[in-house]
Every structure is written in C-alpha cells, then in structure tokens.
Amino acid sequence: MRIRHWAFAGALCGTLLGAVCCAPASLAASALASATQGHLQLSDARGTLWSGSALLVFAGGEGSRDAMALPSRLHWQTGFSGLSLRLRARQDCCVNDQIELRITPGWREFSVAVQEGGDWQLRWPAELLAGLGTPWNTLELSGQMRLRTQGLSLHWDREGWYQKGLVQADLLDISSRVSTLAPLGSYRISLLGASEGGRLQLMTLSGALRLEGNGEISPKGTNFRGWAAAEPGREAALDNLLNIIGLRQGARSVISFG
C-alpha cells in the first residue's frame, strides 16, 4: 500500500511538473494584458511560457478598437536564477541587444527588475502611439521613440504597484498629420519612481513646438499639469495643433489630466 501511495505521489508530481514546463505562451499574453489594462498585448503567442514568441501590440485598452503591432516578433527565454526567474528578450526590428529582466515572487507580491550592464537600446516608431487611442490616434504622430532605463524595477503588492528607478523616453523629430510644420521638435518624458510615488516630467529638447510639464504617478492614479506653445514666428503654423492638444489660454494650450 505504501509503495502505491509513493507511486501516486510521483505520478502527480510528474504531471504537475510537465504542466508547468509546457505552460503555453498564451499565459504570458494574459498576464501582460492584465498588468497593463490592455494597453500592451502579446498577439499570436507561440511556444511556451519558457521559450516563446509573439507580436507586441499597443492598444487603447479594454473595449478600444485602436491597436498597432511592431513589425517583427518578440522572442523570449525564461529560466531560474536562484529564487528568481530570469527572462531574456530580443526583437530584431527595435532592440539592438538582449534585454534581461529578473522576476522575484513573494508572498502576495512580486517585483520585476531590469538588469543593469547591458548595452541594449530600444527604438520604436512613434506611429505606434496611435494604437493607444485618444488623443494619439487624432494626432497621428510620426518620428522615433528611444527608451532607456536606469535602476528600474516594478513592484506589485496588495496596495497596488510602484516603480523604483528611472524610465526615460525620447521622442525624436516628431511630426503630426494635423500640422504642416515638420518636424515639430524632439521631446523627453522622464518618470523617476520611488516607493511613495513617481515623478513625471515632460520637457522640450528642440523644435518649434514647446512642451513642458510635471506630474505624479502612484497606485491611486496619475495627474499631470503642463502647457504647449509655439516658438515666436511659428504661431500660425501651429495654431490648429495647439487647439487640439489642450485648453487654449491665450498663446498657450494647457495640458491637464488626473
């Protein structure tokens, strides 16, 4: 009888181990969609949770019909490193090197950290932002997005999520279909996180359209206050765009949400 019990336990463990090892890549797609409220999705996921690929899609969230995918597949490999999971990802179209993430689970919490020391640089076409819906689909931006991180980690617990470290996105040589002036300029969006909340900053690097602003991101939500204005002599060319960007107050448009 004891041998039979051990045989049953061994079969059960083998079945569970096989299920984990063969877990489909669609589980990663479901987790990413849930964590980003549908704004980032993995379409046509193939392979397993441990070795798979999918198309990365920018979307407007639940109920939105706006979506845009990157032109080449995102490939990933997952393995264990101590008590953490190590995820390595590459994408031929948009990442010049391999990105490595360390995922550390805990009791009712987990964290995801970007490993330092790599030479990766992420470049996406700004047209992807149209997939996020309003107001990006109205502006129909073109140009390049360049992303870098420094000491970045994301933490989830019962209170929600928070970020540590820096995420910096540069929008370079940006143009819009609602303005005849091209390019409008280049801009930087920085998010510096801490356990009590993150600080959001928008600044202009160069260009005729000036954008400036500051805000905060926390588990309770996001708020932002900023403005847009035209460089002297460019007011007529940017008037229509300024009317769309925000609420006009004289020569400026006020950008506010949250």
Image (tube, rainbow, N blue to C red):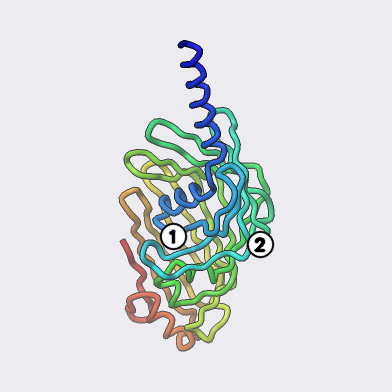
Mark nearer the N terminus (2 vs 1): 1
Residue 242 placement: quadrant? bottom left
- Tell me if 156 is positioned left or right of 101 in this view: left
Secondary structure found at label 1: loop
Specify whether residue 207 is in view: no
CA separation in Å, label 2 and label 1: 20 Å
**In this rendering, position of residue 10 left or right of residue 36:** right
Residue 215: which quarter of the image?
bottom left
Q: In this view, does 114 lie above or below 217?
A: above
Crowding at mark 2 (Cα within 10 Å: few <14, some 14-19, many 20+):
some
| Vertical side of 107 occupied by 206: above or below | below
Q: In this view, does 74 lie above or below 241?
A: above
Residue lying farthest bottom? 236
Residue bearing the label numbered 2: 93
x, y (%) of residue 181? 54, 84
Q: Quadrant of residue 155?
A: top left
Under mark 1, the amino acid is His
The percent position of residue 49, horizontal first and vertical second, equals 55, 44
Question: Which mark identifies residue 249?
Answer: none
Q: Which residue is drawn at 37% across and 34% down?
A: 108
Closest to the observer: 106 or 47? 47
Q: Which residue is drawn at 35% across and 44% down?
A: 160
Q: Position of residue 206 (x, y in %)?
A: 56, 71
Residue 53 percent coordinates (x, y): 60, 53
Tag 2: residue type?
Cys
Residue beneath disc 1: 39
